Each structure stands twice: as C-alpha cells, then as structure tokens.
Amino acid sequence: MRRIRIVVALTLFAAWAAIIGARLFWLQVVDHHKFVLEAKGEQERTFEVAPRRGILYDRDLHPLAVSVYAESAYAVPYDVTDKAADADLLAKIVHTNPDDRYTTAKSILARMNASRDFSWVARRLDPSVYQRVKALHLKGIYFVREFKRYYPDQTLAAQVLGYVGSDEQGLGGLEYEFNKELRGVPGRMLTALDARRHVLGSQERDPKPGENLVLTIDANIQYMAEKALDENMERTHAEHGTIVVQDPHTGQILALANRPTFNPNNYRFDNPAQLEDWAVSDVYEPGSTFKLVVYSAALQQNIITPESMIPTLGGHINVSGRIVHDDNDAIRYEAQRGNVLTASQALWQSSDVAAIELAERMGKDNFYKYIRAFGFGQRTGISLPGETRGLLKPPSRWQPTTIGSIPMGQEIGVTPLQLVTMASTVANGGVYLPPHIVLEQTQKTPKTGLTADTFHPGDNLPDPLPPGAHRVISEMASAELRKMMEGVVLYGTGIPAQLDGYSAAGKTGTAEKIDPRTHTYSKTKFVASFVGFAPVNDPAVTIAVVMDSPEHKYHFGTLASAPVFRQLAQEVLEYLGVPHDQPLKTEKQIAQEIKSAPVEEPQQQLGDMNSLFNEINHLPPDDPLRQQYPPGGAPVDGQSNPPDVPASSDSDGSMHPAPPFASETPAAAQQPPPIAQPAGAPGSVTVNARDKVVVPSFLGKSVRDVIEQAGAAGLGVQVLGSGLAHQQVPAAGTRVPEGTQIVVSFQP
C-alpha cells in the first residue's frame, strides 16, 4: 500500500512537472517574441518627431509661409486627479474661439476618458495662453513643443498659399499641391519608462526638414492687386472678384488675388467659399473679351486687316433663324458710318455682328482650332489644385446657332487664368506660354541656398521654349491686334483703362450669368471683366480683372473692371520703373477722358427694363403688369412682346436666346388673373386696388430722392445708371403691391 502511494505521488509530481515544463517552454520559446514585444510596449514609447515644414518665399525671398515653434498642452489621464474639474479649468483658458469645438470642456474631458496614457488638451497655443495654462501647475498636464504654420502677411495671397491642418498636412493651395516636398521626413524618439511611467532615457532620429519653394509672386505687386480689388469690391458690392497679373514674356504669375478671402492662420472658422481660388476654379462665360480670339484668328488667316471694311448689316444678323443685335450705341455709331466699319472700329465698338461675320467666314473647324491653341477647353497645368479646364464643345456638338454665340463669349466657359494667358499670347508676339507660379525648388537645385529673382520686365521669350509652349499667331498678326486693342482703350469701351504716361491695350466684357432658378440668362446678375496689357509696343505686364455680380449700375466691364486695370497697371508700371512712352496728363485731362467713356450698353433698352421688372418681381406670365412701356414708362395699348425667341442682353447689349445647354423648366403655375380696375392715370395699370400702393413719378429726380420717395411709398428701387431719372417701369399712377421693385433708369 505504501509503495502504491509513493508511485501515485511520484506520478502526480512528474505530471505536474511536465505541465510546468511544457508551459515554460511555450512561454519562453514559442511565445518568446510576443512577450518581448508586449514588454517593450509597456516599457518603451515611440514618438514621431515632426520635421520643420519648408518655407514658401516670394520671388524676392520674402517669407510668405514659415513654421515656428509653439507649445502644445497634453494630459496623462492616469495622473490627473480630477478630470472633470481640470477640463473645465483648462477650457476657460484655451477655448478662445466660440466656434472651436476641439477645446471645449466637454471635448477635453472626452479625450481624457478615452485614454489612460495620453490625450491632447490644446495644440499650438499662443504664448500668452501657454503661460496661463503653465501657471496652473495642474498634475498630469504637460507640454510639448511642436511646429506651427505661420503666415506673416495674414491674408496676402491666401488662396495661392493655401493652409495646413493640425497634423501639418497641406489642405489647400500650394501647401496641398507640394505637401510631400514641403513636409519633409518625420524623425523618431524612443523613450524607456519605469513602472511609475518615469522616463529612464531616450534615443532620437532627427527629422529631415521639408524643401523650400520660391514662387513667381512678387509680394509688393500682390499687395497692390489685393488693395485695388478690396477698393473695387467696396465700390461695386460684387459677390466676388479676381485679379491676375502675369509676365507676358515668361508666363510667370506675379500676383493672383481673390475676394472674399480668408486668413490661413485661422482658416477653420471661415466660410468654405472663401477658401476657393476663383482664378483657376471659377468657370464663367467671358463675354466680349473672347472677341480677341476671333480677331486674332481672322488676322492670322488673312481674312481681315485692321483696315478691312466689315458690313454691320444695320446692327442685326440672322444666325440660323436667330436674330442677334448690336447694342444701341454701336448701332448709332454704325449708322453714322453707313453701316460699314473697319475691323478696328468694329472691335472698338465691340460689334457682335462683325465678330459673328468673321467667325462664319473662317468656319467652325478653323475657329475651334484657334480656340484650343489659345489654351481654352484644357487645363493650363499651373501648380495649383482645383484647376478646371473650362467648358468647350467640339465642333461636332455645335448647334447651328453656336457659331453666333461663341464669338460673343457665350456657350463657352473660361477661367480668369485662361483669359489672362490668352491676352499674354497676344502681348508677347503670338506665343502661348503655359502659366506657372513656382520659380525654384531647393531639391531641384544643386546649390544649398536660394537666390532672389527680382522681376525686371523683358522683351525676350524663353530659349528654348518651355514644354507646352507654341506659336498661335504670327508676330505681324500680334502687332496688328495690339494696335486694335489700343484703340479700344483710346476710342472705345475701354477708355476708363487709360493710363497716365503709358499706352495701354485691352478689351472689356460683360456677360450675363445663368439664373439657377430659371436656367436662362439673368437680367440682374452679370460678370464684368477687363483684360489688357501695357505698354502696347513692349508689354511689361498683362492684367485680368473679373468681377462677379457687381451692383447693377456697375455691371458693365467698362465701369466695374476697366478702372481697376487703370489703377493697378499704373501702380505696377511705376513700381517696376518702366519708362513712360506717352506724355503725362493733367488731372483735368484724366477726369475728362473717363467722363467721356462709352460703355458697352450705355442706355438700357425699354424692353430690357420690362424684362428686368418682370424678373425681379417674379411676375406670372398672365400678370397685367407684364406689358411694354414707351419712354417715360406709360404703356402702349395693344403692344405685346415681339414673337422672337426668348432673348437676353449679352456683353454689349445684343439680344440672343437662352443658352442651348439650359434645361427645360415647366411653365409657371397658372394663377387666377387679378381683376383689372380703372387706371388712376392715362396709360397706367391698376391691379386689384386692395392693399396696393400708387407708383409715384420719379422722372427728373436724383438717385437719392428716388430711393427716399420710393421707400416712403413702401416700394423698392432697381437703379440703372446714374444722374437723373429719365425712364421708369411701371408708369406713374400704376397700383402695385407694397414692396414691389420699381425699375428706374438714370442718365447724366
């Protein structure tokens, strides 16, 4: 019995020893690597050391975006005594912006509860905020130094530079486009910890800083452009505006300004629309500025010379059953010259009829070839994100009337960058040069440093030409068109763009926008533009000014954009030290020239006033107020709208149908017609007199008096022009609902 017990005990002991041995073998041999990794995880911490992000310089090595040190606060929740109380206390200091949800007490506490070892409190603190948090001496709250992206000039070139996120990732502009090059290579720091989480030692691998970029931007010219744009936004109350300044002989962008704008130092709380770079992403119909393509192609193909005579057909042309009209001022000018103009005069007056005739002569395939050669319908390849190619249909998809639309800058979408590059092609002798905005990159140069490249205007093209460059028109055709464009500024719609001491050439444009509600051309929303260069014979700069939806009295390119070109070009040329090529003028001479400038649509047509009145008041089709009025606003009995296709005024007052790409919309719902009452005055209309007000006569009154009188009567006013009122719609004595917008046209 005793031997049996001993055997059993030995057997159990042997089994136990075998199990222990097997377990030890499993732990120390099979799972050895696994437990080594777990031990390292407990005893070591690896931190990524952010590299210094590369600097963005202007061409004179003025820093536009730099990385500076900033303190960030973090918590080790395991060490925090009272998380809720500390979170509330910290939020009172670090939560400086009501829109910042990251630094609220609730967010700080949530991050503390989500981790045992680490949670951010607030990152990249301002020095004053850092000092206040540090003075609290809270247990478990520590600080680490990080890089913070800083833009010394605040909003200057904001859309070009872009912005970075909290993790130093580029999110817009050049910061996004060159994020890989700018960010560099992160370093590593290995830290050993004891059981109490105290640091025993560390090993570091230094980060590799990012590359620096030198831009073609001149910070001084950029400032001038933004200042001019700010003043014009204030004057015209446009929704947004863009200015692009380019060196015509290299394609380098010297300034690119957008409004509204944002501060990249604090971009998170801005309207997303303010972050957009309209110069490369905004597609709009260019209007009459696109006529430069027509005349370039016609000159190059010897279809015309500047003195060739073009019949203007009384200011009307039939394009596949669609009647296109020149504006009233051009028609009067043409009539005085027997309805035959030279090609130069036709461009000065921005004749739609002449432009369409030239396009028809060259044929749609040839015309399309030149449109593409000038860079339209394709991306320029500039190093800015979000660039669009614009809108351009191949000739196989053109409608019969398209040949009458594109020459006027309709049925085609362009960007401001494409527009200025087209004008630079004309300015430099006829060679298309792709625009670019990056001048130098440290990783692409053998030298360790960078050198300033101050802009000095030149007259030589790059040799050899850069990739993508090609000749579009000959030097002769370019010289002829430059002189014709000079005439636009001297005698035509571009007179407000005249400079003091310098010759200038350019073209105005006024394009109607598409109304998203009706999918037809709007009577109240326009894009006003001007593109030009100076001096004429040796251009130093090309400038495009595009204003979106300026106040109606400024909606012409002549009034909204040409004066901006004059202000900016004058400042830039003086700044660059360009010699004068024209006599200096007195202030009296300058004022007289500007006052005498014709506009692309100097007198609002009465039919257009009726259309505008109908549109802004959303009148149903059967409303009795929808009728034609003679001068003064009195209606003509029995007169109705002509049976033409629905038309809207183009950049120069021409009439054309709604865009062919507009979608069909259902007719307005039929409403019971109001009961017409006897008119209060001859020629007036009364509609259901209850809760209606009588329209007073505004004729002969100033803008201010009209607005005050209308306000007292409970009416609104749509102002057209300036000076004294000479037409109104509807007529005085008409009874209309309170709040109705009255259209009043003014003349000096």
Image (cartoon, grey):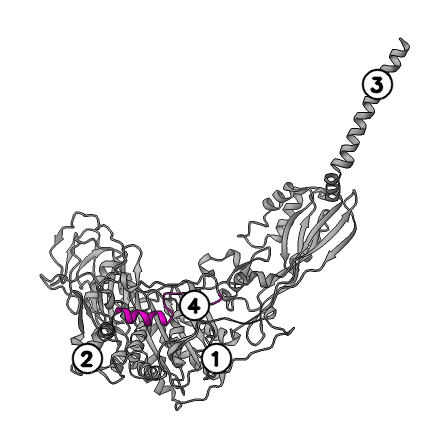
Q: CA distance from mark 4 to mark 3?
A: 87 Å
Q: Which disc, if any, is residue 380?
A: 4
Q: Counting other residues with Cα less than 10 Å from the Cα at mark 1, is it few (<14), some (14-19), or many (20 or more)?
A: few
Residue 399 drawn at (x, y percent)? 23, 62
Measuring 78% from the left and 33% from the top, which residue is drawn there? 25
**Earlier-in-chain disc, 1 versus 2:** 2
Mark before the other along the chain sequence, 2 or 3: 3
Please, which residue is most extreme toward the bottom here? 583
Q: Quadrant of residue 683?
A: bottom left
Amino acid, disc 2: Glu
Q: Quarter of the image for the N terminus: give it.
A: top right
Nearer mark to the viewer, of 4 and 3: 3
Does 111 sit above or below residue 425? above
Which sits earlier in the primary sequence, circle 4 or circle 1? 4
- Give me the disc on residue 11: 3
- Alpha carbon distance from label 4 to label 1: 18 Å
Amino acid carrying label 4: it is Thr
Q: Secondary structure at mark 4?
A: loop
Alpha-carbon span between mark 2 and mark 3: 122 Å
Task: Give amino acid for label 3.
Answer: Thr
Q: Earlier in the sequence, mark 4 or mark 3?
A: 3
**Residue 491 position within the rendered picture, expressed as x and y whole percent measured from the top left:** 29, 83
Which residues fall within the magenta stretch?
Answer: 364-383
Q: Label for residue 462?
A: 1
Q: In the shown orientation, is residue 706 left or right of residue 67? A: left
